Amino acid sequence: MASAKVSHPVKSASEESKVLVVENGKMVDVQDKEITMEGLCSISSYDQWARIPVSGPLPKPRYKHAAAVVQEKMYVFGGNHNGRYLGDMQVLDFKSLSWSKLEAKIQSEEPSDMTGTASLPPCAGHALVPWGNKILCLAGHTREPIESLSVKEFDPQTCTWSTLRTYGRSPSSRGGQSVTLVGGTLVVFGGEGDGRSLLNDLHVLDLETMTWDEFETTGTPPSPRSEHAAACYADRYLLIFGGGSHSTCFSDLHLLDMQTMEWSRPEHQGITPEPRAGHAGVTVGENWFITGGGNNKKGVPETLVLNMSTFVWSVVTGFEGRAPPTSEGSSLVLHKVNGEDFLVSFGGYSGRYSNEIYALKSSRKSGVPSGQLNEPETNGLASVAENSSRGVIFEIEELQDEKTIKRADTSKTLLQAVKGEKSHIEEKLNQEELQSSRLKQELANVETKNVELTKELDLVRNQLSAEEARASQLENEISDLQQRLQKMETLEKESESLRLEKDAEADDSSSGSNQRPADKGFWRWNG
């Protein structure tokens, strides 16, 4: 997919500086026309992207960063530039449209103990989620591998990072996942873990108790993927769109009912979205806007919108050129000014890294989404119930009618049949619950056995290490003995040579004296 790029073509200086914006549906080179826009409110046309001029020191161009809006300011953290992870915190003030860099501090476990000015370890592919007047940071790829996912909190008032204590089993570390606020919980789905392993697991963090849960779901979940987009509808439904594996990009749409924990594939209408990964999304009422992304061949220029109550896809606008709305790994946030909804896009990669700001004023107003999908069906059921009540009243008034009595008897028979079927279904449901309970117990037993086997394996590994150490010591002793043996052999040879010399001297002396030939002398005897 597009996020797998490792080399980027070099562009000429003239091509790098050329930027196109949309005005009245036409592309305009900003170098040929002086920009006079002042703030987001100066955007007059709806559903068109416009480049926003800003002041202050510009952040380093980047992609795969994260952004969040808190109190009229957009906070941008981390990202990737030329393969290097970034760890800076940049702030765009929407009132003055000026950039500034924050020198954040890291709070230690002791409240009174503060480190010097610093930031979190550089990372990319993470998520920022506004929570009250603070910002939560989750997941992301870092230079140093991390076992489990931690939750960091940034306080804009004190400009301080802190690590929140969580309970339960934390998800494994990952990047390119989606983190979605659903009611008072954060839902983490998928991503790319250690060793480039793709994931499709689901984890839920209760923000009130700060407890992690991994729920069992039914239905068919999305295939393992990263760099997808996720959204929440009616504080109940989680939607997953697109993303990619190591070899392909997706354009599928998945729905998870957070009350029943059941996955489904809703049938959508309208246009058919192109496969993409690395895109960004934001919701305005019941409308889900999707921008950017790539599909191994090219970037996706169209900005799409999905009506989450009807599942109808449509194109909001197209955009040519190398701007954040068409980029991979750009950030997208929603900001409201004077009752108008503005989509604000920053950064991204589309042949070059960007640090520009683009905005789109949406013609689709924020509405209060209903608590259920397919509202017309619910209204239809209510209408049927009302008509049924009227029918009952009519039957009571015409109780003397023989046909009505027969109809009532038929209704009783049908009611009894429905009750019998209900009892049968409840019995089957109880059996399924028992079976599920047994399976859970078996799973717990298997996990316990796995823990025991792991302990035994660790013990065997420790014993093996001890044996290897002993074997190494024995090898050293054997080597020492061999050296000593060689020295002894050398000494024996020298001793034998000396004996031979002494024997020769003894023979010479015996031949010149009156000693008996059989007498071999002192050296010969001791030899």
Image (cartoon, rainbow, N blue to C red):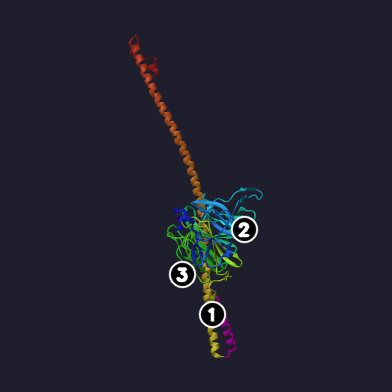
- Structural distance between the alpha carbons of marks 1 and 2: 57 Å
Residue numbers of the magenta segment: 378-400
Indicate the amino acid at tag 1: Gln
- Structural distance between the alpha carbons of marks 3 and 2: 38 Å
Q: Nearer the viewer, mark 3 or mark 1?
A: 3
The reply to whether callout 1 and callout 2 are in contact (CB within 8 Å) is no
Q: How many marks?
A: 3
Q: Is residue 239 visible?
A: no
Q: Earlier in the sequence, mark 3 or mark 2?
A: 2
Q: Is residue 306 above or below residue 81?
A: below
Crowdedness near tag 1: few (<14), some (14–19) or many (≥20) residues, C-alpha within 10 Å: few
221 or 89, which is in the foreground? 89
Q: Which residue is mark 3?
A: 271
> Residue 180 appears in which quarter of the rendering?
bottom right
Indicate the amino acid at tag 3: Ile
Q: Nearer the viewer, mark 1 or mark 2?
A: 2
Horizontal side, residue 288 vs residue 518: left or right: right
Indicate the amino acid at tag 2: Lys
> Residue 66 appears in which quarter of the rendering?
bottom right
Name the disc covering residue 134, or none. 2
Helix, strand or loop at mark 3: loop
Q: Is residue 456 visible?
A: yes
